[in-house]
Amino acid sequence: MRTSTGRSVAALLGVMTALSLGLGTVVASTTLRGLAAAPSVRRIDLSGSHIRYSSVALGDLNGDGVDDIVVGGSDGKVHAYRGTGAKLWDYDTGNASIESKAAIGDINADGWNEVVVGVGSTFTGSAPGGVWAFDHNGGKLWSYASGDFNGDHVADGVYSSPALADVDGNDGGKLEIIYGSWDAHIRVLNDSGTLLWQKFVSDTVWSSPAIGDIDRDGKLEIAIGADSTRAGGGGMQDGGRLWVLNGENGSNVPGFPKQIDEVIYSSPALGDITGDGWLDVVVGTGNCWSVPACAPPPGGTHPVTKALYGWDHNGNPLPGWPITLSDFAFASPSLADLDGDDALEVMINTTDGYVRAYNVNGSYVSGWPKYTTPATNASPVVADLNGDENLELALPCNWNLLVWDRTGTGLWALGTNYTVNGTPAVGDVDGDGKMELVVGGGRNVAGYPGAIYIWDLNDAPSTSPAPWPAFRRDSLNHARYPMAQLSVYPSWILVLHQDGSGSSETAYLWVSNNGDGTIDWQVDSKPSEATLTPDSGTVGWSPQSIQVDISVGGYGPGLYDLGDIVISATGEGEAVVGSPVTIPVTLYVGDVHRAFLPLALFQY
């Protein structure tokens, strides 16, 4: 884990000057291109062992409106700090190392964010694993122990990063905890730590869940990878499976699971890759079934496919997918419009050291891939890190964080004191209105204690684009690229006017966002006879009504096409799915007869 050779990675991208590696100093950050100086770094020294694979989570724990930092240590400690360096709390879960990323969210609807983390590691196989939950002050709420799938009389570990979501929709917005475990279960817990449901998948689960309404039924589904073996029965084969499950009860979504010939240690990401208005699922694999020490009987090893997989919401492979890779992708994909072409690209790194960016058709984004050594199983983060309104990509590489611009040109090699294996995160953690880049690691001193490194991105305002700023993308670990969708109802307005009865008629439209978050909508054009109130706004899931007043003065009996109302919408400054919407307006003038249904019908 600890190696001074990590510093030589800068030779691939530029020359790095090293400072002393003693306490309180770090390897110098190096500017690889003259557009902007490398950011300055701060270090928080932790009271515990180094951070091995746990990725940092950002979320507001103390209610001050500023994101705090949570990360798990290789000694089982959970650390919570403010971005200023002030300690909030830590909690020692025991001897089992923490390799997962914590989830931060208000699981019990008490107005405060809680922290939920998976516990367990192959490095500490004799220590019990499971899931732990803490209140915002670091007090333990509950823990849920895993089963013992491998028969060693120890609760199996949870490498999976839990996700928080209201998948049952029946408890006032409280959030359930979704995760996979090495005890061969995909599990959903209530906010109180009791079991809602679990699904036995016959083999270990390393993958983390992604959460989204994949089949657009108005409810959340869960996408997660797992190992599989023919010994599990039920038509399973030696390899791995991508499961998509209904969140409320764990039943299979039609078209899934998908069987492949290699394990799925990688964690899936959700996004509208093809631009058809539906969520797609993309995921890497792992490396087991070609390794004799890993592949179990009865089949043992077999030829495996090194690929990046993608499926649509029906379980069909995306056109041209899977994408063949030169090595395995244990890492998890990140999604963003990296090159500014108004389409999502997929970023992932492989175990041969290549960092890759793909278009939807499987071709490389211009300037990619890039080679690094040694390789990492961390995942890329994508955000505007230097305030140029373009996206950069950051990824750990041994002792450093490497940063490239969207064309693959190296910007910075950001040095630390120790090996960095977890995925960094981007956010404003000190409330200065500027972005920071945060990662967990260690210090190259006796005992190799833990540390958090924070780079001040002073040229990047906190409002800078950050489409995939952390592992699993957000503090709830949903791993879903937001997919806003404009919806306007009805799709046609027919105005009926009794000839001679007045000068205007009123109709209504309802506008809503059938996707994530909120959207900003506006009326782009309308017939001259129409007045819309309001003519712009911001809307989420709950529909917003628009009053449409139609002036009918000057129209005699007949049917008239008045023209179209055109409404557009944007989310995060970009046009959303379904925008613009065109609503034809038709006016009828003549005799209008209205019939009213009775309030009750009786059968004799």
Image (cartoon, grey):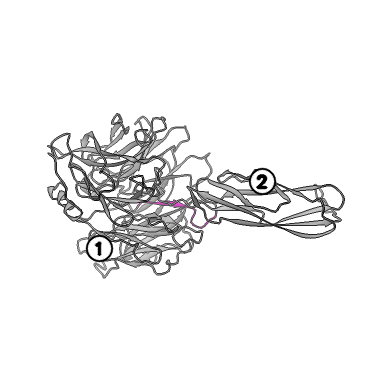
Left/right placement of residue 336 relative to residue 289 reads right
Give yes or no for residue 578 being in the magenta stretch.
Answer: no
Majority secondary structure of the magenta segment?
loop
Mark 1, residue position: 296
Q: Residues within 10 Å of mark 2 (few under 14, many from 20)?
A: some
Mark 2, residue position: 546
Question: Residue 42 appears in which quarter of the rendering?
Answer: top left
What is the quadrant of the C terminus in the image?
Answer: bottom right
* SS at mark 2 in the image: strand
Q: The disc labelled 2 sits on which kind of residue? A: Ile
Residue segment shown in magenta: 208-217
* SS at mark 1 in the image: loop
First in residue order: circle 2 vs circle 1? 1
- Between 248 and 415, which is closer to the camera in this rendering? 415
Is residue 211 visible in the rendered image? The answer is yes
Q: Position of residue 526 (x, y in %)?
A: 67, 53
Q: Which marked residue is nearer to the observer: mark 2 or mark 1?
A: 2
Left/right placement of residue 493 relative to residue 182 reads right
Left/right placement of residue 603 relative to residue 149 reads right
Q: Position of residue 274 (x, y in %)?
A: 46, 62
